[in-house]
Amino acid sequence: MISSWVTRCGLVAGMLLVTFGVLASGQQAKKIDVLRIGTSGSLALNASGTKEQTAMEALQSFIKTETGFDNEITQQKDYEELIQKMAKGELHLGVFQGFEFAWAKEKDSKLLPLALAVDVYHYRYAYLMIRRDGKVTDFASLQGQALSLPRAGQGHLQLFIDHLCQTQGKPLSAFFSKIAPAETIEDALDDVVDGAVQVAVVDRVGLEAYKRRKPGRFNRLKELAHSAAFPPPLVAYYEGALDAQTRQRFQNGLLNANQKEKGQRLLNLFKLNGFAVPPGDFNQVLAETRKVYPAPKNATK
C-alpha cells in the first residue's frame, strides 16, 4: 500500500536537482562515470506515461548540463531497499517522501538530510474539508459518507486519513462508503462544494491556492480537522559517502536553483518553490511523525 502513497512525482523528481554538485565517494573525491540516484516512488507527474517520459528526459538533460554526468534515476521497490543500496554505496543519493525518511532514519541513523523540497512551506499539512452548511459535526459523523482523495499521490494525505479512520476502529475502505479519486486538489474541493462527496482531504498549499482562485466557493467550505506538520520530501545522503566540500557544493546548488534560468524552469515543471536546509525543529517533526504514523508492521526486516 505504501507504494501507492508515494506518487507525488513533481516533488520527488524535483528533488533530483541535487546533481548541481560533484559527487565523491570515500575520503577522496572519486571519478563517477554515471551518477546513480534512487527514489522509492514513481516519477510520473500524473497517470500519463507521455508526461512521465517528458519529465524524465528534461531532468536527465538538466543533470547532464549542470554537472557533466551521465545519470541514472531508478525507482526502488520501497524506501527500505533504497536505504540498503545507499548503505552499500550502490546509489549515490536517495530521494524520500518525508514520512518515509522519518521511518528510514529510525532504522539507520547514518542517513542524513541534504535538502528539503519546499512548496511554499517547509512542512506539509493535511486538511479535512467539508461543506459549511452540511450536517457533519465531527469525524465520526462521516462514517458511511463519500470521501474525495486527490490522485496527486501526496502520501501524507493518505496517512492522515488512514489514521483518523483507525481512531474509529475501522480501515479507510470500511469507514467511508465511497472513496472518489480526484485529479487535483481543486477538483476534490469542487466535489465537496457541489455535494458529490461529503469530505475531501487536501494539502494546505492546494487549499490556499483554491481560496485565492475561487474565494466564493471556498467560503462554502469549512475545516473539520488538520494534521500536525509532516516532513516534506527530501534529498538524503549516507554518512561517510560524501566529503564536506562536496556536500556544501550540493547544498549550495540546491538552495540557489531558483536563481538559474534552467533550474527555475525545472522547479516550475515540478511545482516546487525551491530547496531549504532542515529547520531547527526538523528532528522533532520526524519523531512526532513516527509516533503518530509508525512504519508499517509488515515492513521488510
Image (spheres, rainbow, N blue to C red):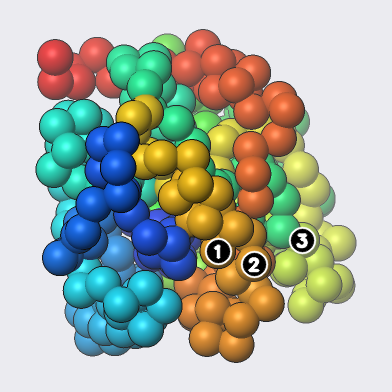
Picture layout, residue 88 above or below residue 191? above
Determine the CA span between mark 1 and mark 2: 5 Å
Q: Please give the residue where the numbered disc 2 appears in the rendered image.
A: 256
Instruction: Give the numbered dot on residue 158.
Output: none
Give residue 94's position: percent from left, percent from top. Answer: 32, 45
Give residue 190's position: percent from left, percent from top. Answer: 63, 68
Q: What's under tag 2, amino acid-wise? A: Asn
Residue at position x 55%, y 63% from top? Answer: 253
Of badges 1 and 3, the one in the foreground is 1
Q: Please give the residue where the numbered disc 3 appears in the rendered image.
A: 208
Camera-nearest residue between 164 and 118: 118
Q: Residue furthest front?
A: 28
| Residue 159 visible | no
The 10 Å Cα crowd at callout 1, few under 14, some 14 to 19, many 20 or more, is: many
Q: What's under tag 1, amino acid-wise? A: Gly
Marks 1,3: beta carbons within 8 A: no
Determine the CA span between mark 2 and mark 3: 26 Å
Of the numbered discs 2 and 3, the one sitting upstream in the chain is 3
The 10 Å Cα crowd at callout 3, few under 14, some 14 to 19, many 20 or more, is: few
Give residue 272's position: percent from left, percent from top. Answer: 58, 66
Of badges 2 and 3, the one in the foreground is 2
In this picture, residue 16 sits left or right of residue 49: right
Give residue 168's position: percent from left, percent from top. Answer: 49, 16
- SS for tag 2? loop
Q: Please give the residue where the numbered disc 1 appears in the rendered image.
A: 253
Camera-nearest residue between 154 and 255: 255
